[in-house]
Image: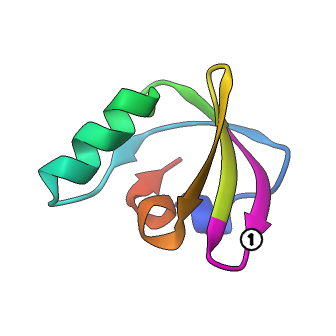
């Protein structure tokens, strides 16, 4: 399951990042989003979702959200 289908307020563990774009992979890694890390969907928005990773909150679009498998 990817983050676009995740429930709001529930903590998940990132299982994998499925992307062929190395820049996107590096960007997610810089946010602290990689396999084994906990991630929480704070809210779903029209163009994406708000996620909590470590001590930060980030607004990510649907393309990034669909690449993060939990």
Residue drawn at point x = 82 percent, y = 54 percent: 8
Residue beneath the point at 39% across and 60% down = 67
Above or below, 8 relative to 44: above
| Left or right side of 14 for 17 | left
Q: Quadrant of residue 26?
A: top left
- Crowding around mark 1 (Cα neighbors within 10 Å: few <14, some 14 to 19, many 20+) is few
Residue 1 visible in rendering: no
Q: Position of residue 43 (x, y in %)?
A: 80, 57
Majority secondary structure in the magenta region:
strand
Q: Position of residue 10 (x, y in %)?
A: 80, 42
Q: Which residue is the site of mark 1?
A: 45
Q: Is residue 68 above or below residue 34?
A: below
First to last magenta residue range: 40-48
Residue 42 part of the magenta-drawn span: yes
Is any atom of residue 17 visible in this view? yes
Q: Is residue 58 above or below residue 64?
A: above
């Amino acid at each position: 399951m990817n983050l676009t289908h995740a429930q709001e307020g529930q903590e998940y563990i990132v299982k994998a990042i499925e992307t062929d774009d190395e820049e996107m992979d590096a960007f997610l890694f810089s946010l602290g989003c990689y396999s084994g890390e906990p991630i929480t969907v704070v809210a779903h928005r029209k163009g994406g979702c708000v996620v909590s990773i470590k001590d930060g909150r980030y607004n990510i679009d649907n393309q990034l959200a669909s690449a993060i498998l939990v």
